[in-house]
Every structure is written in structure tokens, then in C-alpha cells.
Image (spheres, rainbow, N blue to C red):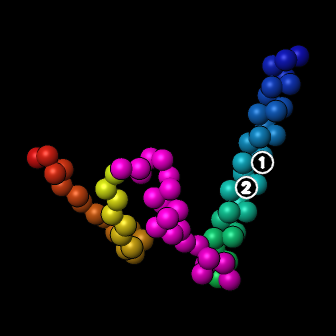
Amino acid sequence: SEVEKLSLEEQRLDDKIREMQEKLRSLSEDENNQKFLFVTEEDIKGLPCFQNETLIAIKAPHGTTLEVPDPEE
């Protein structure tokens, strides 16, 4: 039936998503790859969501909390 067919396709896609997530995790945790895990200023500025926006980049240890006041308050 169509429902069974769609259910099998959904399961296949879920399996592929899990597989890709594991591959990404493995790549990011491999010490040999860590020196390549970065984006450039041009990479970020090239994203449409950041066009004509103020952007502040912060490098901080994992678990750091940053509070930014609303400039209009």
C-alpha cells in the first residue's frame, strides 16, 4: 500500500540521517581533522541571513554563557 511504501521510505531516510550524523561526529572528533574545522569571515558574510546585519564572532570555551543587552532598551 502507499502508506507502507511511505513508511519504508521514511525509515530509509531516518537511517541515512543517523548515518550522516555519525559520520559528521566521527569527522569532528578526529584530531587529524580538527585543524580544518573552521569557517572564514567571507564564509559567514556570504550567507544571505547575515547580509546587512551586524555580526559579532566570539570564541569561548564550551558551556560559556553570553548575555547581550537589547540596544533598544
Q: Is residue 33 magenta?
A: yes
The location of residue 52, given as percent across then percent down, is 36, 50
Residue most extreme to the left: 73
Q: CA distance from mark 1 to mark 2?
A: 6 Å
Q: Is residue 66 above or below residue 3?
A: below
- Is 12 or 67 nearer to us in this picture? 67
Please tell me whether mark 2 sits on a helix, a strand or a loop.
helix
Q: On the rendered structure, is 44 left or right of 33?
A: left
User: Tag 2: residue type?
Assistant: Met
Task: Report the residue marked by disc 2.
Answer: 20
Category of crowding for the residue at label 2, using alpha-carbon neighbours closer than 10 angstroms: few (below 14), some (14–19), many (at least 20): few
Q: Quadrant of the N terminus?
A: top right
The location of residue 35, given as percent across then percent down, is 60, 81
Task: Tell me whether circle 1 and circle 2 mark residues in contact (CB < 8 Å).
Answer: yes
Please tell me whether mark 1 sits on a helix, a strand or a loop.
helix
Q: Is residue 18 magenta?
A: no
Category of crowding for the residue at label 1, using alpha-carbon neighbours closer than 10 angstroms: few (below 14), some (14–19), many (at least 20): few
Residue most extreme to the top: 1
Which residue occupies 73% across, 63% down? 23
Q: On the rendered structure, is 67 left or right of 36?
A: left
Q: Quadrant of residue 10?
A: top right
Which residue occupies 81% across, 19% down? 3
- Is 9 or 72 nearer to us in this picture? 72
The location of residue 58, given as percent across then percent down, is 36, 69
Q: Which residues are magenta?
A: 32-52
Task: Report the residue marked by disc 1.
Answer: 16
- Is 29 or 72 nearer to us in this picture? 72
Which residue occupies 50% across, 52% down? 47
Q: Is residue 3 above or below residue 19?
A: above
Q: Is residue 62 above or below residue 7?
A: below
Q: How many marks?
A: 2
User: Tag 1: residue type?
Assistant: Lys
